Each structure stands twice: as C-alpha cells, then as structure tokens.
Amino acid sequence: MSEIKTIHLKEYKKPAFSIESVNLTFELFEEYALVSNIMSIKKIDETQSILSLDSIDLELKELWINDLQLSDSRYTIEDEKLNVLNVPSAFTLKIINKIYPQNNTELEGLYKSGTIFCTQNEPEGFRCITPYLDRPDVMSVFTTTVIADKELYPVLLSNGNKTQCHDSFDSRHGVTWEDPHPKPSYLFALVAGDLGSISDEYTTASGEYVELNIYCDKGNESKCHHAMKSLKEAMLWDEEKYGREYDLEIYNIVAVDSFNMGAMENKGLNIFNSAYVLADTDTASDANYMGIQSVIAHEYFHNWTGNRITCRDWFQLTLKEGLTVFRDQCFSSDLNSSEVQRIEDVKALRERQFVEDASPTAHPIQPKSYISMNNFYTSTVYEKGAEVIRMIHTLLGEENYRKATDLYFETFDGQAVTTEDFLWAMSEASGVDLSAFKLWYHQSGTPKLEVKESYNNGVFTLSLKQIIPDTVSGKTQQVYFYPLKMALLDENGIELLEKTLLISKELEEFSFEGLSTKPTLSINRDFCAPIIIEEEHSNFSFLMKHDTNSFVKYEAAQSFAIETIEALMRNEGLNEEYIEAYGHLLDLDIDLSYKALLLELPSVSTLMQRMSIVDFEPIYKAKEELSLRLATVFKEKLLNIYTQNHFAKSVELDALSMSQRAIKNRVLRALSSLESQDITLLAKTQYEESLTMTDRVVALDILENTHPTFAQVALRDFYAKYKNETLVMNKYFSILAASDREGTLQRVVALQNDEVYDEKVPNLVRSLVGVFARNYKHFHSKDGAGYSFVANKIIEIDKINPQMASGLCGAFKIYNKMNDISQTLMKVELERIISTQELSKNSFEIISKILKINKK
Ligand code: PHE
Ligand code: ZN
C-alpha cells in the first residue's frame, strides 16, 4: 500500500494541462492486455514543465512525445504517478503499457467477470488502465479500438457510436468506437465477451432513432425484457419531465455478475450488476422488479445529470448522485404508487442514512476530505443528497424548478461543475434566495425539531426549536433553513388548513387564529424535510385514523407502535389503545401495498436508533410480545385478508397483483409470530404451491425462523432447483444469514464451503457475510464470536477487494453506542483489523474513524 494521504476539498487546483483527444487501442489476450494511449495534450499553465499522470501498477512499455521515443531520463515513476519531464506547450503523447485484467480482483479498472472483459472506472479506476489525468474536470473526446479473439470475444463494445470493424487479422478481430461527447475518464468503458443480447429501438421526441441493446450471459436473454421496458420508460420520462433527450445513435447495457456496486452510467455503455438487469417471475421478487426499474432509470438519467454535466472534483459527488436519485425517485413515484414510493424512500433513508449520520463516519453530503473516495458512495451523499434536492424542489415549486433545471442544463452543458453552480441556477431562475440553504451541503448529522403546541382563545400556537447535533469531532453546527409542510385538522379529521412553513431560526413560533376548537397537528407532511420531529404528546391514534396525508398517517402508525413497544421495554404493560388502532388499520379499504406498509411494525434498527446505549434483547422481546398479541387478537381478520389476496398460481406483475402479494405476505408474517401449526402449514403450502419468487422467499424465511424441520425440506428443495442461478442463491444465503435460529453463525461459516459460494463475487459476499453482519442477534452475540468472524472476513477480503472489505467494516459503526462489554469485544477486533499488515486505505479510513470516536 502506498502511504495514507488525506485529500482535502480546500486544496483543489485547476488542471495544468488539457487533453484535447484520446485514442485508445486495447489488445486483449488471455494472460494480459496491451494498451496504447495516444493523447493530444495542451498546456493551460505555461509555467508547468512536468506532466504528472496518474498511474497505478502499470507496466510501461513505450513512451513517445510526437515522433520521439523518450529515454529513462525524460520521465520518472513514483508514488502512483508517471511524471513526464520537460514537456512542450502542445504535443502528442503516446504511451504503451501492459496490464493484467485476469488477476484484477479489486474489480476496478479493466477486469474479468467470469469470461467477460469489463471496466469500472469511477471514481479512480482509469489510472489502473493507462496513465492519465484521472480527474473528472479533465474532459476529452475518446476513440477506442478493441481487438480480441474472434471466437471467445465476438462482442466488442466501448462508448459512443460504432464506426469501424476490422476483420483482417486471422483469428482476431477489432471494433472502433467514437464518442463525440467530451467526457472524464471515469465514464470510459470497454466490454468484450461472448454475450447474448436483446435489442429494441427508441425514437426521441425530435425524431432521432436510437438502437437499444442489453447484453448478458448467453441463456439469460429472456430475463432482460423488464430492463428494456424500464429503459424506454425512463427515456420518455426524461423527455416529458425535464425536456432531456438521448444524444447518441446507440445505448448499450451489459449485465455482469462480478460488480462492486449496483450499476455504472458510462457514456452510451452502462455496465450493470446482473442483479439489476435480470428478472423473470420464477427467479426474481417484486422488489427485484422495482429495483431494476429504478436503477435502469437512475443510470439513464445520469446521461444528463452526471455525464453531459459532470463533477468538478469528487467532493461534488452529490451534484450528480443526489440529483439523479431524486430524479429516479420521482420517476418511480410517477410510474407506480406515489404514496408507497415516498414511504419506502423515507424508510431506506432512516434505516441507512440516519444511522450513518449518527455514527463516527458521519459526513456532509459534500464531504470536506477523504482518504479513499470509494468510501464516499454513501447513503448520505446519495439519499440525503436527494432529500436536499427535494427540499429545493419544494421551495421553488414545480414550475420554477423546471425553469431552474433548464437553466442549469443550458449554462453548464459540457462542463465539470460544483454544487455552488447548481445552486446558482436554482436561485437565478426562480428568484428564491438559497444562501441560507447552503448549509445542508456542509454540515453533518440529522437535525431535530422539538415541537410544542398550545391552544388559547381560538389561537393555536406552534413553538419550534431546532436542535442541531455536533460534528463527529465535537464542533457545534448552525441551525438550518428548510420548508416544513403542516396541516391542522378538526375533530372530524377535516383539513382546516395546509401550509408550508419556512423554518430558519433556532426558536420560532407560528400562530393560527380563528379556530373554534383545539385542532390536531399534522406535521412534516410528505416528510418534506429530512429531520427528526420530537414531540411530547401527539394524538397518534387520531392521525392514524384521520390524517389525509398518506405519509403522516403512516408516520402516526409507526410512532404509536414505537411508543407502545418502548413502554413494553420499560415493563409498563401493553397499551390497549394501540391494539384498537391497529384493528382499525386492518379494516381500511385502501391501496393494498400502502396498507401493507401501515401494518408493518417499526424495525429493530428504528428502535435501536432511539437508545443511547444499545441493547438488542429488550427490543426483540418487546417486539415479539406485541406481534404475538396482535396476531392473537386479530387472527381471524388477518387470515381473511390472507385468503382474499392469496392466488398461488398468479404470476402477474400489474400493480394490483403486486399489492395483493404485498398485503398477503405482510399478514402471513404477522400471523407467523403465533408459531402455530396451522400458520406454519400455510407458509409451507405457500412455498410449495406459489409460482412467484416473492411468495416463495417469504414462505421460506418464515419457515426458517419458526419451523426448522419444514425449513430443512424447503431449503433443500430450493437449493436443488436454483443452485445454478447465482442471483437466486443470493436469496438463499441471505435467508440463512439473517436467521434468528440458534446456530446461525455455524451455518454461515459452513456455507462458505458451498460450491456455489465465491468470495470473489461481491453479491455473494454481501448476501452471506454482509447480511450476517446486520443480523443484530447473532452478530452481537455475547461471546463475541460474531464480531470475530466478521473481522476475520474483513481481513481476508481486504486482500482481494478493498472496496468490499470496507463495506463490511460498516457493521462496526455502531461501536460507540454499544454497552461496555460489547465495546470491549469489538475493540479487540477493530484493533486486530487496523494492525493488519498492508491493510487497504479503504478499510483503514473506516476503522480509524470508528476507533477515534471513543478511545476507552
Ligand atoms: N455512479 C454509480 C451510480 O450511482 C455508482 C458507482 C460508483 C458504481 C462507483 C461503481 C463504482 O449510478
Ligand atoms: Zn448514480
């Protein structure tokens, strides 16, 4: 490992050179690849005589300036740089270097996923391919020729439009691609393989024809149709909502099995984790279908928000990611149930981002420094970033927001810009002053809002107090400016008024006059701001019954359940009023997916976040007690809902069928806490008879957690059916790794020897080790065996794939919230990890942050 350096935003300097064009030739062989890189370079800063190119582990073969081959004295190689000395003002630099994609297990740069050559260059992978100014503010026009064996690699792809085929070298062939749009190196991509594909076409609003292809392993073609449909939906949506059209003759997507993340928006050649492309009803769940639709759209939307307009430096990552997540959320909301989409997005934010924001790795959506940029592809940059854009959207209103995005695209097309530039466009086009809003980009932690209500002589007064957490290092932070949507309801639940308040001070009061009786407050409607509302007394059961805002109705149900569970944790008995309110939810005649969400009890993570020192046992106990009581009281009703919505032979994917599966499986889970013979049999039958993966996985999970004997039979059946489908095997490993049952750790350890498991495939590691590390019960087992297992895996995987390893380190972020006994056990493991020889900078950055926060 090279020395550990921290990169700071404040040290940003403009590039001293520009690269006008790049001409790349790849010769791919089984043992190695040769890269020829011809760049036309110009000085921007005439005082510079050394061109310092990023270069990691590249075997340099030849180096030329114009027609002159350079001798050793004209360049130096040091510390991940190739320095070319005494360069003129404008010149052609030619580099030939050798790389070893077959040995690349980090999955960054050029690597092999199974038999397919593919690339991943965001954020800094290109420097593992060829020496370059590998930074997003250096944009250039790329021409790429790929040459490989004809039979093994009939498909040769790169960015842009296909311009030439070369068939003249015997057993080998080549293809040349030209991308007319200047782009940074992180958007470069190359694929070579013997791939299957499906094709389609799209005509843009201005009449341009676009060829669409999705490539995958042969045999999987029939699983690509949902992805293709989603792509066309996304292309149309971006035209209608943002006036943005696609800008090349061809759009290619390639699905690969070994990929560190979800997918990558390379210009004209997206590379996807196959989990976000492949689906059919036999192998994919409804959640998978939704995930594919949203990730396909996300990567497509990057073509404008990310590719045409890119980031000046990596500190600006949320410029493209926060905005693009906001865009994909709105897309999903327009195409599916908007109430369900909003709740799902908020749930995800709270489960991941709120936890991160309260941890030692908390950071602003625009971080100030990093050691490894790979560690900053976080739910803060992505999901909180999207919430920040959503607030801007609320402050501006739909019409002004559209004017502002138009101005943004017009002004910055073809440039690498900052979040400041984005905010300028938002404000310039709308006239809305966003100067106070900027803090959202620079502060960390989740803000709280303390709410007090009073009612006197027809006047309702809301007293609000902002409580802002300190930074990780203990610095105080300032209060925020944000929109807060609220309403007042009368005693029948009729809306008296709805308003968007602008919050900007630490203490604020809002009064509402002329109210004949005390109204009920409905606050943070639609989860307008990503904050935590703290209120002493609220009429949860009233809001559950009457609120007209689908989010607040859900929120009230959650809050009432939280209050009830926390009372149980304090041994204060079970609040019967909650049971009654839950019964009311069961009777509602509303969208069934929405109803399924209303019926869900708060997660262990939600309850855990509210404790200052975490102990999981009382949470599990109280939740189990409440679940059992609800299932006992409402068994009849729950069973009715089940029977009315269960159609074992249905494989339809329309909204109604999906929502029927959602509600039926929700009530089956609720009933399973009875652990009674009839319910277990219901789950067993569902496993055996249902034709969808959604139904089978839920049934399997219930059996695993309630009936080991049935589970064994079902699991064996599942394994036999699907052992050749790695995407399905991920589900198998996840169910076992998330299991409540005794002996889970032992089974996880043993599963590593399963012939299907492969430590080099990130999806498999995530579904076995990653899921286990989030299994609170077994990861935090009192003997420390869970900690020690995960630490061993981190150390081992760090040598294979540092990005995967640092992801697993996340499990320890809860360190400072654990009790002394657990902390002591964790500390031993954390220190063992950090003292590992040649630990990657990725893992080092996370573990050092965790340890620093609480040195005991
Ligand atoms: N830019 C990708 C996305 O969000 C994520 C990604 C980052 C993928 C880094 C791979 C590596 O769409
Ligand atoms: Zn993205």
Image: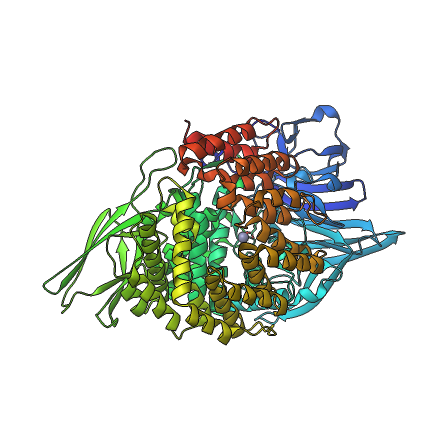
Q: Is residue 441 left or right of residue 295?
A: left
303 or 492, which is in the foreground?
492
Above or below — where is 235 with respect to 347?
Answer: below
* Residue 204 placement (x, y as % from top left): 59, 69
804 or 372, which is in the foreground?
804
* Residue 612 placement (x, y as % from top left): 35, 41
At x 48% / y 61%, what residue is drawn? 329
Q: Is residue 420 left or right of residue 740?
A: left
* Residue 555 placement (x, y as % from top left): 35, 60
At x 40% / y 61%, what residue is drawn? 401
* Residue 827 placement (x, y as % from top left): 48, 30
Q: Is residue 70 left or right of residue 643?
A: right
| Numbered label tally | 0
Q: Is residue 572 left or right of residue 178?
A: left
Above or below — where is 800 with respect to 619?
Answer: above
Asked whether residue 824 appears in the rendered view, the answer is yes
Asked whether residue 528 appears in the rendered view, the answer is no
92 or 574, which is in the foreground?
574
At x 71% / y 56%, what residue is drawn? 723
